């Protein structure tokens, strides 16, 4: 079993910055893609940013140039640096990871979510 634990959310004024962190722990052979999603009440969860095992990046258009995703494979961690935050970025942010176990099976996991609130 694998657990993803996010940290770093909070309340920030528009134009400010936050850095989210997500630590994966448990029985892990390898982590493939890792990513950050967000969700507001009444809306579907959307992909914000993703990073593959070889470092390929993918961002939703609305955060390009403001958010940066990075990972530390030695620590099984993924980060999301969020700059120039806007009220529209307010959401619960979820960490996601595709984890390969010792038997070679891939499983997808979610963190519990961390609230990001941007005030105007």
Image (spheres, rainbow, N blue to C red):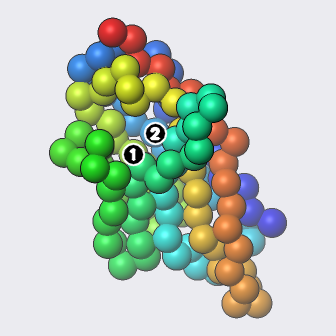
Residue holding disc 1: 80
- Within-10-Å neighbours for mark 2: few <14, some 14–19, many 20+: many
Outermost residue to the left: 65
Residue 112: x, y in percent?
69, 42
> Residue 81, can we see it?
yes
Q: Between disc 1 and disc 2, whose residue precedes? A: 2
SS of the residue under disc 2: strand
**Viewed as shown, does residue 114 lie left or right of 25?**
left
The structure residue drawn at horizontal position 30% and vertical position 27%, both measured from the top left corner, is 85
- Within-10-Å neighbours for mark 1: few <14, some 14–19, many 20+: many
Outermost residue to the top: 120
- The image shows residue 66, relative to residue 10, as above or below, that is below
Residue 45: x, y in percent?
57, 46
Q: Nearer the viewer, residue 100 or 76?
A: 100
- The image shows residue 49, relative to residue 91, as above or below, that is below
Give me the C-alpha separation between circle 1 and circle 2. Answer: 5 Å
């Amino acid at each position: 079993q694998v657990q993803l634990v996010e940290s770093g959310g909070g309340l920030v004024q528009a134009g400010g910055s936050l850095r989210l962190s997500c630590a994966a722990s448990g029985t892990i052979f390898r982590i493939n893609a890792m990513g950050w999603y967000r969700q507001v009440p009444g809306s579907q969860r959307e992909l914000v940013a993703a990073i593959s095992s070889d470092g390929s990046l993918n961002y939703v258009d609305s955060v390009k140039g403001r958010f940066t995703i990075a990972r530390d494979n030695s620590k099984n961690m993924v980060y999301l640096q969020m700059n120039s935050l806007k009220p529209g970025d307010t959401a619960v942010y979820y960490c996601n990871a595709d984890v390969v176990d010792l038997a070679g099976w891939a499983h997808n996991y979610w963190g519990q979510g961390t609230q990001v609130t941007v005030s105007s």
